[in-house]
Image (cartoon, coloured by chain):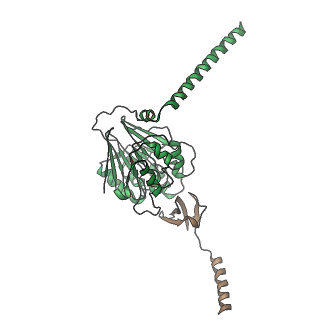
Amino acid sequence: MKVIVERIEGNFLICETEKGSYVELPLELVPDAYEGAVLKIEFDKEDEKAKRQRIERMMKELF
Amino acid sequence: MGIRKVLKNNKIHSLLFVCLLLSLLFCAGCQQGISVQEQAQAQNICPQIADEDDLLKLVFIDVGQGDSILLIAPNGQAMLIDGGENCAADTVLAVLAAEEIEELAVVVATHPHSDHIGGLLAVFAQTKVQSVYMPQVSHDTAAFENLLMAIKTEGLQITWAKAGDMVALDDSLKIEIESPFLEEHSNLNNYSVVLHIVYGQRSFLLMGDAEAEIELNLAGINADVLKVGHHGSRSSTIDLFASRLGAQTAIISCGKDNHYEHPHAETLETLTKYDIEVYRTDLDGTITVLCDGKKITVEAEK
């Protein structure tokens, strides 16, 4: 999903969702965000898979 | 002969030039020579008040985290400055109904943030609006697009609000736009339409969400009542600005227990330092300010 940075208040990004509602994100997540920036929030299945494989490998070695 | 004529003309030109220069210097001298007090009086000069019973009314509506101010001129004409968030629309409409406002001569959207423009959608849908003032700046949100759509649906055009322009609402009232004063400002808050309203001997300064860089430019302006910029955030109400304002009363529009901790302690300290009494919509609810041109009374809902 995509959100647009509606405004920045202190350490929060106030984001407008595609439904027109508002969510707050900590500025820490996107420190270089600016008013009007469109943020794409998506899954990273590749990264998820790679991490899982790595940990499973270690688990097999260690148990 | 020809040469003499030219010389003569040159003489006239240089004489004119000197006169012009002198008058310019004189004007500049006047400007700089005026004391702060004289400036205050000059700013407060206003057409005659018809009747002392004629009141200017400003209602700082408790819209939670956001801004919405209803101004009712002595002649009954009404102006709405911001409309809070979309979810505050019913509150704003209820105030318009309670004040028996069927038509708004002016709507000002100070800047395109949702906590200022959200509630205006319902206002345009349900109330007759004659004119709209906005800073000439865009925002890519649905909230802003919806506002433009609502204005378009009403068949209205938007007046570009910029420093130096006046809003004509009532002959006894002077409403001057103090900011935005540049074509480009650093962020949307700093595009805020700042209004200086003078009625008789009293004046009001409504800051929208304008921050320090705007206040620096406005330092020296006088007002009895200040609608504090940016919900009392530390981004605004700098010492230099507050110290020279001469205000007795400050209004902060913010939501109860808001996430951003508005108003910030620094802002409250600055206002206290200069003996400015603070009213807050989060604590006092809707705040009504009445002025007869001399006296100002403040009524808090809670």
Residue B219's spot in the image, x, y percent? 50, 42
Query: Can residue B218 be seen in the rendering of this structure?
Result: yes
Left-right relation of A42 to B218 = right
Residue B152 location, x and y as percent?
A: 46, 49
A6 vs B220, nearest the viewer:
B220
Farthest residue toward the bottom? A63
If the image is split into quadrants, where does the C terminus of chain B sit?
Answer: bottom left
Picture quadrant of residue B65? bottom left
Q: How many marks?
A: 0
Answer above or below: position of B99 versus B263: above
Q: Is residue A53 above or below residue B196?
A: below
User: Left or right: B128 with respect to B216?
Assistant: left
Question: Residue placed farthest to the top in the image?
Answer: B1
Quadrant of the snapshot with the N terminus of chain B: top right
Residue B6: x, y in percent?
69, 12
Q: Is residue A49 above or below residue B82?
A: below
What colour denotes chain A? brown
Residue placed at 29% from the left, 38% from the top? B54
Q: Is residue B135 visible?
A: no
Q: Nearer the viewer, residue B110 or B225?
A: B225
Image x and y of residue A36, in percent: 56, 57
Colour green maps to chain:
B
Q: Residue furthest front?
A: B273
User: What residue is at 69 percent from the left and 12 percent from the top?
Assistant: B7
Residue nearest the observer in this picture, B222 or B196: B222
